[in-house]
Amino acid sequence: MKIADIKEGKILGVNFVDLIVVTLVLFLAISFMRTVLHDPLSFSGEEVYKAVKTYNRLESKGFLAEAEVEATAVGDPTGSERRLRGLVVSARGGTLYIKNSYGDELSVGGSMSYLEDMAAKRITLIPVYAASLSFYSNITRFANFSQLILSLEALKRTTGASSVVLSGEVSISQPETRFLEVKKAVESCYLCLNARVFKIGDDLYVLSLRVVELGELERLNLSSGEVVARNLRIYLGYEEELEYSQVEDARGTAKRLGFLRDVGEATYVSVAELL
């Protein structure tokens, strides 16, 4: 048998047209499988810019995300591989900045990195929740810090959320605790992008919160006088995507509890839709 029979229009006994059709079908099938099976939150060391872009898209919508990284330390002559996990606190250029549970921060770059702490072989982003419903709080004053926490816990429980995340400013009076103690307690949070404390008067402080999980505030156990919130944005996080009726129920509940003036002010976003 001839490998190529031009006269008969065959290759290895197969018609040219049939061969082209089979090749095209196989190409489309492989492309489809790559698209379907590819994890949009997993990146090779050469795709660090894509990882940064994806993280920034998540962060812009109030999603906290951890990262699991397989990497080697830049400058390590042994090239030994390490597995790291921590919260991504920022990402820019070709670098992810990851904080572990001890508060240590490492910079992670691509496989050819030479300036960062670690050179990644594989990066996987892990959002803390899969979807969120967010809105600015209509309630701005609370009798004390405990009432703030209890009110948000009630909101979390009645809306079926798995997480509550906050951004904004909270003013508190804390006469029984020194400023440095409050500062250390607030700024040592793990599930947060940023938390700062500023002293604005005698025993009066402002907590500046940027995407801070409610549990990080609960552990502070602060006893204070009146609490005033400014530009307080609340993110209700859910482990799974919600159906339309579930979103409407959560909006209605938030309004009933006084956190929403109008259900139209609440925005629902899912990780799957973003990516």
Image (cartoon, grey):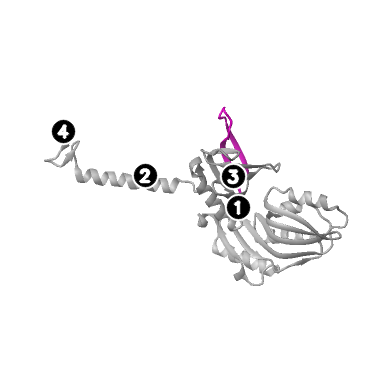
Q: Which residue is mark 3?
A: 67
Q: Which residue is mark 4?
A: 2
Tell whether position 191 is magenta: no
SS label for mark 4: loop
SS label for mark 2: helix
Residue at 62 percent of width and 66 percent of height: 251
Dot 2: few (<14), some (14–19), or many (≥20) neighbours within 10 Å?
few
CA distance for labels 3 and 4: 56 Å
Q: Amino acid at mark 4?
A: Lys
CA distance for labels 2 and 4: 29 Å
- Give residue 152's position: percent from left, percent from top: 72, 60
* Magenta highlight range: 63-86
Q: Which numbered disc, 1 or 4, marks the residue closer to the eye?
A: 4
Q: Which numbered disc, 2 or 3, marks the residue closer to the eye?
A: 3
Extreme-right residue of the structure? 176
Horizontal side of residue 133 vs 184, given as left or right:
left
Cβ atoms under marks 2 and 4 closer than 8 Å:
no
Q: Earlier in the sequence, mark 3 or mark 1?
A: 3
Extreme-top residue of the structure? 78
Q: Earlier in the sequence, mark 3 or mark 4?
A: 4
Q: Amino acid at mark 1?
A: Tyr
Residue at 41 percent of width and 45 percent of height: 34
Dot 1: few (<14), some (14–19), or many (≥20) neighbours within 10 Å?
many
CA distance for labels 1 and 4: 60 Å
Q: Earlier in the sequence, mark 1 or mark 4?
A: 4
- Give residue 140's position: percent from left, percent from top: 74, 67
Q: Amino acid at mark 2?
A: Ile
Q: Which residue is mark 1?
A: 129
Question: Which is more toward the observer, 93 or 39?
Answer: 93
Horizontal side of residue 142 vs 249, given as left or right:
right
Q: Which residue is mark 2?
A: 30
